[in-house]
Amino acid sequence: MGATPQDEIDKQHGEAYDAIISMKCAPMVDRGEIPLAWKVEPTMNDPRYNEAENVSVNGNSTLDTFQLKNEDEQSRYNLGSCISSRGQVDVSKLISLVTPGCHIPAATTNKPVSELKKMATNSKSNLWDEVNAAKNNAHVVRPSHDAWGIKKIVLMFCDDFLQTVYEMPWWHSNPAMRNAMKPILDALNIKPDRIVRMLFAALPPGTTIPVHHDTGAWVSKTHRVHVPIVVDDPDRIVFRCGPNESSMQRVSCIPGHVFEMNNQAKHAVSNCQKNNKHRVHMILDYVDMVHDDAGVSDSSLSSPSSFRPRRIQLSPGETLLQTRRSIDRALDKSKRPTPSFLIIGAQKAGTTSIYEYLNQHPLVVKARRRETHCLDWRWNHTLNNVTERKKHCLSFFLAKELKFHPSCMTGDSTPSYLLDSYRCIPRLKKVFDHYEDMKYIVMTRDPVKRAKSHYEMVTSLDGTPEQIQARGKEWLKLTFEDVIRLDMCNMKKSGLIPYWDIDREEMDMDAFNAFVGTNCEDEAFRAYSKDHVKMGSGSHSLISRGMYELQLRPWMCAISNKDAFLVMKLETMKKVGVQTTMKKVFEHLNLPYYKVEDESAKNTRSYNEMTLKTEHMLRRFYAPHNARLERLLSDEEWSGDPWVK
């Protein structure tokens, strides 16, 4: 959601002045806790709210004029359902704590934390002072609010995916603050371990936060509560909320009014006070419940999560490093090495799609290029030591930037690595000493269809000059059948397929069973890789790339942790869908679930079918190799020939 233009904000501020007289506050109705099921998506996307608005009379929805399934729906689609008054409490103790300095305009917003810590603190009792916060609390950035001059006192804050809650020194080391907050927590009937964000916000006079709805993974998993604290003239604070912009209702902002709002609904607030005073609200987000186990316990696609995030008590003056969706302690700098994952193959099996879907996750940062090839044909042979080689490989990633944000990750997608284990594995171990801790993703596809797709890509003249050059020209004058025979002959020369009669197109199963998995096969595969797997060209290894077990085995032998590998089929992704597939990928990478927005397939092309004679021959060749893959993976998904219906 883009920033609201200033002229639109000015317009909305003028409308707020009009609303002071024309729009009375809605009744303070306690509707109880707003169910998180009502917050799965923005309310403006739900047509039932529009239906309720269309039959409203004087702002009160006559819900009996259209069909509703049950009482829950009647509550949900009432136009006042976006606000619930949870109580009226005494906030006098909070007023005494947050009044000092609250009306002083923000003067140091957007200065680096390092610079703030060098400045003099005027008063430790002024908790709004950013210098004081940087030295004695922990500095937190809220980009939009900071830009509007909205000051803050942060007591708890979490990252966007609710993985970690940071408890600030001004909360966990300040009994007076905890005691002053008790009436609010009692009204909500919650304990501090359910709170994920808690802060005070001082809205400057003459300022409007424009109509918007909140975004981010945390929104649908938390209850958002506001409590007016310092408000000199409540009649001139215009806080509005409703399922869409045209049906927002005004909320009473008298001090101590504890109200919950559906922040997936549209809302806005304006400080129209004449006395040049800031308006101070306490803002609190809490989760439905907590579990005994640490970490995210529910990453389902449909229901909001209930979990216990990791909680960290910060020390005074700690520095937090933030991106739009992540928060890390400066103390954790360089905690995650780069890269975190490799998509190693197979070519023409959906690796581009998986990589692009993965990079839509807010905690994943793209490499400088999708296929780095830093371990095969972009390997720099002129470098003489490990340090230089590692520096060269890391130059393909935003490694320096990611040092400061270990909750984020990056990775490589170079599908030629799966085939070229002969070169890539020793180089991997040389430059990435965390290779055992990395995660590996392998995409497979019906090897017969993969081969045809590979041939069509390499012989296509569509694409950029760089792409055409990388494909090579070796196959441009050869038929699909010519290229099949060429690769089989190369494998024969290397001793890799002694069990296959190229001319008769027959498999000797006794010879196959005696040869596969032996040292002789390993030596033949190394010889084939050395002599026939070319650098800088895609015109090679048409058939061997579909022998997945042969390629996977060296990788799984090199990495002791077999759970480091996720092997999937392109056909399964097409069957179960992108979201289910990516949920599996995110879990493999220990990433919180994120709904992929762009599900379109990447790097696809249409081509003519091969002849039945060629297809049947390839299926005879690949059948025992597919069985090898089944035994290697020993998973129900791979039982039987995974590509034969």
Image (cartoon, rainbow, N blue to C red):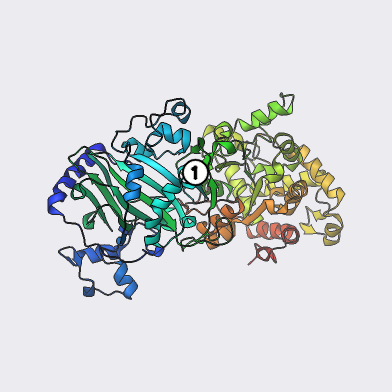
Question: Label 1 is placed on what type of residue?
Answer: Ser
> On screen, 74 above or below 187?
below
Q: Image point 15% across, 64% down: which residue?
A: 58
Q: Quadrant of the N terminus?
A: top left
Give the structural element (helix, strand or loop) at label 1: loop
x then y, percent, for residue 66: 24, 73
In the image, 202 versus 298, the foreground residue is 202
- Is 257 on the left or on the right of 15, as rendered? right
Can residue 159 be seen at all in this image of the molecule? no
Measured along the vertical axis of the image, is residue 140 above or below residue 616?
above
Which residue in the structure is indicated by mark 1? 326
Image quadrant holding the C terminus, namely bottom right
Asked where in the image residue 511 lies, by quadrant, the reply is: bottom right
Q: How many marks?
A: 1
**Label 1 neighbour load within 10 Å: few <14, some 14-19, many 20+:** many
Please indicate, yes or no, whether residue 460 appears anywhere in the rendered image: yes
Picture coordinates of residue 216 (x, y %)? 42, 50
